[in-house]
Amino acid sequence: MDQSQTRELQQLDAAHHLHPFNDNAALAKRGTRILTRGEGCYVWDAEGNKLLDAFAGLWCVNIGYGRKELGAVAARQMEQLAYYNSFFMCTTEPTIRLAGKLAELTPGDLNHAFFSNSGSEANDTILRMVRHFWAVQDRPQKNIFIGRNNGYHGSTMAGASLGGMKGMHKQGGLPIPDIHHIDPPFWFADGGDMGEEEYGRVCAKRLEDKILELGPDRVAAFIGEPIMGAIGVYIPPKNYWQEIEKICRKYDVLLVADEVICGFGRTGEWFASQYFGFQPDIMTLAKGITSGYIPLGAVMFNDRVAKVLAERGGELAHGYTYSGHPVCTAVALENIRILEEERIVDRCRDDIGHYLAQRWKELGEHALVGEARIAGMVGALELVPAKPERRFFDERGKVGVICRDIALRNGLILRATNDSMLLSPPLVLSREQVDELFEKAWKSLNETAAALGR
C-alpha cells in the first residue's frame, strides 16, 4: 500500500471511526496504524513494517496468524448454513458439538455452556444468571458480587461494573448497585517482606473480611481473573486461589473464574484454574476460544448452578441474536482441534514456555526493570526509576508509552499499562523468535533508558 492510500484510509478512519480505549481526537491527529497482513507470529502494517507480535493481537491469537484451516471451515459452514438462532427450541450441529467439547475440556463439572459474542457479554450473562440462581431459591437478597480493584471483566455496563477500573467507572454512572471490590494480590506494590504463601493468605483474607462486612447472606459470588491481565499481569501466589476457594465454600459464595485471557493454553494448562489448582463454579471464556479469528464468548456453569437454572428458573429470559452462531462455533471447534492435534498447549507447558520464561527473566536484569514476572506465556516487565527499590515513577504510564513506541520502531509489539510492558505472544512462538523478542526488547529498554537520560 503506497503512502497516499495509507493517508486516505487514515483520514477516512479519523472522520468516521470511534476507536475503543483511545483519545480519538489525539489519534486523529497522529493517524492510526493500519495492519494489512499476518502470518505466524508476525503482522505487517500498511507502511510495510514487519512486526513481531508479542501480544497476540489482544491476548488472543493463540495459534498464530494465517491458519487457512479456520477460514476454510468458516467458508464451508457459511455455504451450508450461514446462520440460525438458538431461540425457539432450535440450534445447530457445531453449536451442540462445541458445548460438548467445552464440557470435556473445562475442569470439574463445568458441563453446561451458554454462548455469547464476547467476554464482556459473557460476564453480563453471569451477573444476571447468578442473581437469578439465588432468587429462584427464595434468596433474592443474596445478590452482591465482589470483584477486585483494577480487575477487568469487559466494558459493558455489567462488565465494567464487575471490574474495578476507576477510570472506567467515571464514564456512564458505574458501578451498578451491589457490586463491591477488594484489593488484588500485587506483590511488587504491597508484598513487603512476606513470603509467597503468607502473602497469598493475606490477600485471600481480604475476600473473607469483605464477605463478613457485607454479610454472607448477601454475597452471591466472587469474580476474578486468575491472572489480572489488563492492569499489568498481576500473577498471584500459587496458594492464593486455593485460599479463595476455601473462603467461597465456607460462606456458600459462587466462585467465578474469568478465563478470557488465560484460557486455551496461555499458562501452559488449558485453563489457569488448573495452573493454580482451584475449581470454579462458573467460568468465562472468549479470545483464545477461536484464537481471535471470529468473535465468540461462552459461560461454563457447573452442574449445581445449571440444575437450578434448568429445573427452577422457568424460561431463561436472556440471550443474544448470535448466541451459538454456527460459523463461530465451527471455527472454535477447528481452533481447538489444532490446539489438541498439534499439542500446542503441551508444548507451551513442557518446552517453549520454559525457554520464554528464562529469557524474560534475563530482561529482569536490565537497570530499568524492577520485576520480570511470567506464568506460562503471559508476563510483564515492571519499569522502575531505581533498582532495587520497589517503587513506581511519579507520573505513572509515561515511561511505559515511551518504551512501547520505541519497541514498535524496533519491530516489536508489546502493550504498555502504566509502566508495565506486557507479554502475551502466540503460543506457536519458536525458540528463534523468543531470541528475537529478547534482543528487540533489550534494545528497546536501552533506548528507553537513554531517552530518560539514564
Image: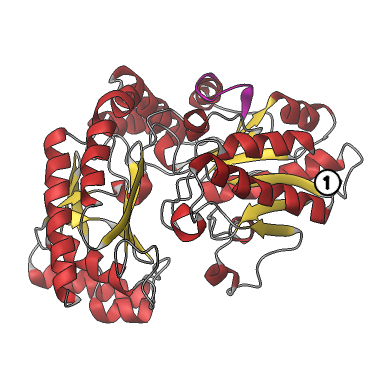
What is the basis of the colouring in this image?
Answer: secondary structure
Q: Which residue is mark 1?
A: 216
Q: Position of residue 103 (x, y in %)?
A: 56, 22
Say which amino acid is labelled 1. Pro
- The quadrant in which residue 277 appears is top right
Residue extending farthest right:
138
**In percent of the image, x 39 and y 26: which residue is there?**
336
Q: Is residue 32 visible?
A: yes
Q: Is residue 346 above or below residue 258?
A: above
Q: Is residue 106 shown in magenta?
A: yes
Q: Which residues are magenta?
A: 104-112
Q: Is residue 308 above or below residue 224?
A: above
**In percent of the image, x 35 and y 36: which residue is there?**
376
**In percent of the image, x 30 and y 70: which residue is there?**
385
Q: Is residue 320 visible?
A: no
Q: Is residue 84 above or below residue 419?
A: above
Q: Is residue 211 above or below residue 415?
A: above
Circle 1 packing at 10 Å, graded few (<14), some (14-19), many (20+), is some
Left or right for 299, reference 307: left
Q: 109 or 326, which lies in front?
A: 109
- The quadrant in which residue 108 appears is top right
Q: Position of residue 370 (x, y in %)?
A: 32, 58
Q: Secondary structure at mark 1?
A: loop
